[in-house]
Amino acid sequence: TLQAPKPVVVSATPRPNPLAASAAAKGVFVDCNGIDLSAGKYFFNPPVAVVSGNASAWSASYAKYLLSNYKYDRNAGCTKFSTLAEAQSYYKETSDARRGAYDLNGKPAPLIITSWKYP
């Protein structure tokens, strides 16, 4: 008996979106912020790709940036991620959590987005 040839299936996989590909980029990305709850000062920096350093070096660099640019000398720190997507998600989550927050005096606290780069 003759069998019909099996149909050829063409993949329907879409081409990757360049932005999605870059969001999935692997490496070392850091989100830095400075938060002073009592003064109602909230500084957030979008994710930055870094090729060297460690949490202490990044945090010290960000603290120096805040002091130089905003006269802010309180709590500052950086969190490390292995993908840009993770760093972007954390940045959005943490900054959104502070957006519209109030300081201890009951006044709306500004969310200040910084543009620090390392080094």
Image (cartoon, rainbow, N blue to C red):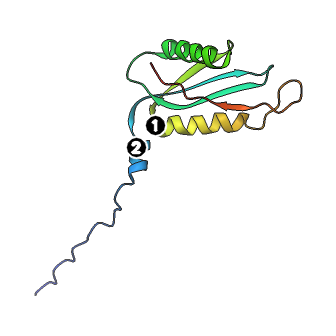
Asked if residue 41 is positioned above or below residue 64 in the image, the reply reads below
Residue 9 against residue 102 in the figure, above or below: below
Residue visible at 44% across and 43% down in the picture: 23
Q: Which secondary structure, mark 2?
A: helix
* N-terminal-most mark, 1 or 2: 2
Horizontal and vertical percent position of residue 88: 53, 38
Which residue is drawn at the image coordinates 65% and 33% (left, top)?
A: 94
Amino acid type at circle 2 is: Ser
* Label 1 to label 2: alpha-carbon separation: 7 Å
The residue under label 2 is 22
Q: Residue at x 19, y 77 (%)?
A: 6
Give the farthest residue toward the front.
Answer: 69
The quarter of the picture where residue 73 lies is top right
Furthest-bottom residue in this view:
1
Q: Quadrant of residue 114?
A: top right
The label number, if any, that marks residue 84 in the structure image? 1
User: Which residue is located at x 40 percent, y 43 percent?
Assistant: 22
Identity of the amino acid at label 1? Leu
Label 2 environment density (alpha carbons within 10 Å; few <14, some 14–19, many ≥20): few
Residue located farthest toward the left when viewing the structure as drawn: 1
Q: Are marks 1 and 2 in contact (CB under 8 Å)?
A: yes
Residue 45 image position (x, y, % from top left): 58, 29
Q: Residues within 10 Å of mark 1 (few under 14, many from 20)?
A: many
Numbered disc total: 2
Most foreground residue, 22 or 107 = 107
Residue 81 placement (x, y as % from top left)? 48, 29
Residue 106 horizontal side relative to residue 64, left or right? right
For the C terminus, the quadrant is top left
Tell me where residue 101 sits by quadrant.
top right
